[in-house]
Amino acid sequence: MRKEAEMPEPQPDAALLEEMERTAVTLADLAGARIAAALGQVLSVRYKPGESAHAFRDPVSEVDQDVEKLIRTLVGERFVGHDILGEESEERPGRGHDIVWAIDPIDGTTNFVNGFPLFAASIGVLWRGRPVVGAVWCSTSHALRPGVYHAREGGRLRFDSQPLELTPNPQVRRRLAGTGAPDDPSRLPYDLRRTGSAAVECAFLAAGLLGVSRFQTPNVWDVAGGIPLVRAAGGQVLVRGEEDWEAFDGFLDPAAPQRDLRSWNRAVLLGEAGAIAAMRSAGW
């Protein structure tokens, strides 16, 4: 009996992808303007509940909440029926929809509330769990100014709508690696940096400022906006499996398709293929 050909995986419409990228850039810009305007003010800050050892480790400012409300409202008006996954609210207006907007209104809130000027606003769009659009406003950039890194699946990496392709200086013998966990730098071929923002690190990876980065337990909204940037720049994205790193193909778990995206937090390794190989060989 002849085996029937497998049906190709449905893909989002190219025009829709382009429209969502434009909207994500607009939202990231609006978020950045709100964040910049609030920097230096006396903000209302609360802390998420947690274990005593981690007390006061996960702050939320009034700006986080205001920015997420703004983005939720605008997405709901522009894309009726789309789902929204945000860090600050558990409301899911379109649960079960193929398209999910993953919002991190301020990634790097601890930096922000302390006035340390390194943070981001991240907008990611998922198609059936796969990140296909990303826009990340960063408080600083390769150009030494705020701006939005953005990309869509099949498109180019851009910074403030301009194509971006940076070439690292070949005379720099030890490049930088972002890490969210302590490591012994003496045994690694890269110098380590901790930015306090997964979204910033993804954007900096895409721009060539970092060679590789690892996040231990990110949430979907931490990396959903950054993964399309890294891929558009030619980088790889791996997730930690039961025994080793494996290719990332989306946030949905085929073994548990009904599992809520909010519970996803697998370790992620991103960057240039050579950098990933070098760091894995050194024990990452």
Image (cartoon, helix red, strand yellow):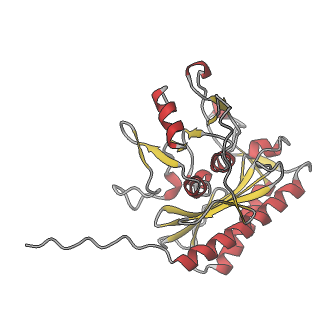
In the rendered image, the vertical position of residue 242 relative to residue 68, given as above or below: above
Q: Is residue 57 something that shows in the picture?
A: yes
- Residue 249 lies in quadrant: bottom left
Name the residue located 62 percent from the left edge and 63 percent from the top edge.
151
Instruction: Residue lying at the far right in this picture: please name it.
Output: 41
Say left or right for 147 vs 49: right
Which quadrant is the N terminus positioned in?
bottom left
In the rendered image, the vertical position of residue 172 relative to residue 201, given as above or below: above
Q: What x and y, as percent, mark residue 230?
A: 58, 52
Say left or right for 34 vs 165: right
In the rendered image, the vertical position of residue 171 relative to residue 42, given as above or below: above
Comparing 23 with 254, the one in front is 23
| Mark count | 0
Comparing 28 with 260, the one in front is 28
Q: What x and y, as percent, mark residue 276?
A: 51, 38
Instruction: Residue lying at the far left in this picture: please name it.
Output: 1
Q: What x and y, as percent, mark residue 129?
A: 47, 62
- Residue 189 lies in quadrant: top right
Q: What x and y, as percent, mark residue 247?
A: 42, 48
Comparing 118 with 45, the one in front is 118
Q: Is residue 89 something that shows in the picture?
A: no
Name the residue located 70 percent from the left edge and 40 percent from the top edge.
196
Instruction: Residue lying at the far top in this picture: please name it.
Output: 186
Say left or right for 9 vs 95: left
In the rendered image, the vertical position of residue 271 relative to residue 249, given as above or below: above
Comparing 12 with 232, the one in front is 232
Name the residue located 64 percent from the left edge and 70 percent from the top edge.
21
